[in-house]
Image: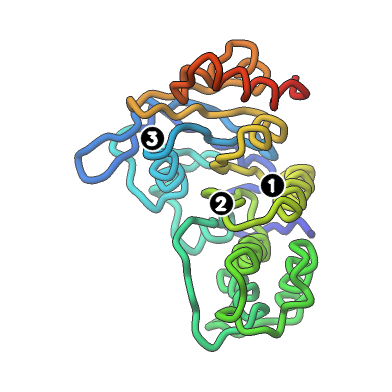
Amino acid sequence: MDIKKDSNNIEKESENIGIKELSAGYHDHIVIGNISLDIKRGEIVSLIGPNGGGKSTVLKTISGELKPLGGAVIIGQDDIKNISLRQLSRTMSIVNTTRVNPEHMSVLDVVLSGRLPYSDFGLFKKEDMDEARRACDLMNIDKLSHKPFSSLSDGQKQRTLIARAICQDPRILIMDEPTSYLDIRHRFELMDVIRKLSDSKVTIIMSLHELDLALEISDKVLLVRDDGTCSYESPKEVIDKEQLKELFGLSDDMYEKVRRQLVHIR
C-alpha cells in the first residue's frame, strides 16, 4: 500500500498521537479519566479490559466521534478539535462495532467508499479503484468483490469494513473489536495485516477481547478498568506484574489458566 502525502497541515512524517489528561464519557458523566499517553507513528496499541469498562468510549473520543470531557487529543501538532472533518478523514479511518447494511451496494462499492475523502463529488479515479482492489486483496475478499454486501456472512462483512478502512489510506487506524465475527483463520490473517500496516508506519489503536493476540501483537497496552482508571504498559509489564488478574477480577485458578495460555509471550 502506497504512502501518500496530502496538502493539509498535518505532516505524515510527524503523526505521533499525544493524549493529554483525557477524560472520556457522555454528557457530563466521565467514564474514564486522566488518560495520558504518547503513541509513536507506526505503533500498535491495544485496549483491554472488562466489558462495560469504557474501551469503546475511549476509542470514540480519540477518533473525535465524542468530544473530550477534559484534556486533549493531539495529532502531530494539532488538537483534533481544530482539524476539519475532511482533513481528519484523510488521516484517520475507523472500524467500529456498529453494524451497517448499505442497500444495493456490492462489496467493491463498500470498499471503494473509503476513497470518498479523496474524490470530487463521489467521482472516483483509476487510482481509487486500484486502492480498493488492493485493500480487497489484502483482506482476502477479492473473490467476493461483486457480491451484494447484504448477502455476506457477518465475518465477510467485517472483513469488508476493515478493507474499506484500509482503502482510505489512513495514517491512523482505529478499530473497536475488529476480530468480532471472524473465525480463527481470519483472526490470524488480520493480525498479519495489522503487522504489515504497522511496518508501513500506520498507527493502530484497537480494542481486543483476545488477550493472547493483544499481548503478542501490541507495542503497548492500555488497561481500562471498570472503576474509571487506566494504565499504560508494555505487554511484558502486564504479564510480569500479573495485572490481568486484578484487571478482570480473576480467581487464582482462573488466572493460572490464563497464564498458561500466555506463557509464550515475553
Left-right relation of 215 to 133 = left
In the foreground, 245 or 257: 257
Per the image, label 3 sits on a secondary structure element best described as loop
Circle 2 residue: 9
Rendered position, 163 above or below 123? above
Rendered position, 171 above or below 127? above
Circle 3 residue: 53
Is tag 2's residue or tag 1's residue first in the polypeptide sequence?
2
Cβ–Cβ under 8 Å for marks 3 and 2: no
Question: In the image, what residue type sits under mark 1?
Answer: Val
- Residue 236, how many percent across, how many down? 68, 18
At 43% from the left edge and 24% from the top edge, which residue is drawn?
230
| Numbered circle sitting on residue 202 | 1
Q: In this rendering, which labeled residue sits more in front, label 1 or label 3?
A: 3
In the foreground, 83 or 266: 266
Is tag 1's residue or tag 3's residue first in the polypeptide sequence?
3
At 46% from the left edge and 25% from the top edge, which residue is drawn?
248
- Residue 37, how many percent across, how many down? 51, 27
- Residue 81, how many percent across, how many down? 38, 48
Bin the neighbour count of mark 1 within 10 Å (Cα to Cα): few under 14, some 14-19, many 20 and up.
Answer: many
What is the C-alpha distance between the residues marked 3 and 2?
Answer: 35 Å
Q: In this rendering, which labeled residue sits more in front, label 3 or label 2?
A: 3
The single residue placed furthest to the front in the displayed view is 253
